[in-house]
Amino acid sequence: MKQGEAPPKGAWTGAPFGGVKAPEPIVLPDPAARFARAADRLAQLADGHPMEGWLGFLADVADAQRAAAETLSVVGPDAAAIRLAVEAGLPPLAADGFRRDPAWRDGLAALLRRFDDAALPVAAATVIVDLRGRSAAETEALADGFLRGGLDASDAGAAFWIAAALQVYFTRLAAGLEAGELRLLDPRGLCPCCGSTPSAGVVRGSGQTPGARYLYCSLCSTAWNHTRAVCITCGGARTLALRGIDGDDGAAKAETCDECMTYAKLFYDAKAPSLDPYADDFATLALDVMVSEAGWARHAPNPLLLMG
Ligand SMILES: [Zn+2]
Ligand SMILES: [Zn+2]
């Protein structure tokens, strides 16, 4: 089953002999549903939010990603390459090593086109014009810089669009894999498809395995099960604590670890059924600020906020 899909009618969802069913280890994305859900939730969260304009812009970006994801055609690795990677304990779509199909730049062009007539601030509009003017080789170099680290600070504006386009491309690729052929990685905190860090985790309130935590890949949108009350960065369990903002709806928490002094965000969909790990991550920056000021570092940056 993919994200955004309802279980097929009549499908067997219980454990065969009444035992406790183990959580599905890996849930591959449905690309259009992934971005449509983020767009809807961002629009909902923007209403009356202190960062209303910015969240509204991100909703437009997510909707442009949905449109690009619906039309982009991608060719992924062949079955033999996938099997080899999985047997070696490696992610088959390794973000820093996988040979990209130039088609990802079609997705980038489609994204940028959507903002041609948008009323963007001058600086943002200039970034788009500049990015359009880059050659294929320069654009590929930006993507390599983004995926492997080492982008120049002057490319901060371009990095946002590169990241958004790579999300579309890798999400389409991940959707073409078979969950049953994949394995969770060691370390468990990294995406089993592409090896990237997650944006956030969700503790599911319903479904086959209520209470299970899923991490959501910041690049390819794959979700994977991760034991709760274990630090996703260092695997420690002794000093974890959940911290939230007093007086909010209780759906967003930061799980802090004193062994490695990092935190990861965790959302409880029982408290906010329409939550989306990507949208809610943006809308809860106040929680990041609070926990960072208290001394914990985020386990990994949000790729769309990588450089300011
Ligand atoms: Zn991934
Ligand atoms: Zn830790």
Image (cartoon, rainbow, N blue to C red):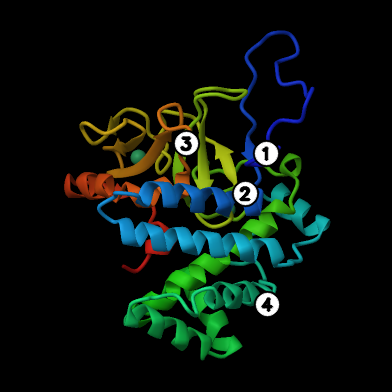
Whether residue 221 is visible here, answered yes or no, is no
In terms of depth relative to the viewer, which is nearer, 80 or 9? 9
> Does the numbered disc 4 mark a residue whose Cβ is under 8 Å from ligand 1?
no
Q: Mark 4 = which residue? A: 102
* First along the sequence among labels 2 and 4: 2
In terms of depth relative to the viewer, which is nearer, 280 or 244? 280
**Given this view, does label 2 or label 4 mark the residue nearer the observer?**
2
**Given this view, does label 4 or label 1 mark the residue nearer the observer?**
1
Q: Mark 2 = which residue? A: 33
**Given this view, does label 3 or label 1 mark the residue nearer the observer?**
1
Q: Secondary structure at mark 1?
A: loop
> Does the numbered disc 3 mark a residue whose Cβ is under 8 Å from ligand 1?
no
Q: CA distance from mark 2 to mark 3?
A: 17 Å
Where does the image place residue 133, in percent across and percent down from the top left? 51, 91
> Alpha-carbon neighbours of circle 2 within 10 Å: few (<14), some, or many (≥20)?
some
Q: Are marks 3 and 1 in contact (CB under 8 Å)?
A: no
Q: Are marks 4 and 1 in contact (CB under 8 Å)?
A: no
Which residue is located at x 33 percent, y 82 percent? 122
Q: CA distance from mark 4 to mark 3?
A: 33 Å
Q: Amino acid at mark 2?
A: Ala
Q: Mark 3 = which residue? A: 202
* First along the sequence among labels 4 and 3: 4
Where does the image place residue 66, in percent across and percent down from the top left? 60, 59
Quarter where residue 255 is shown: top left
* First along the sequence among labels 2 and 3: 2
Q: Amino acid at mark 3?
A: Val
Where does the image place residue 40, in percent across and percent down from the top left? 50, 49
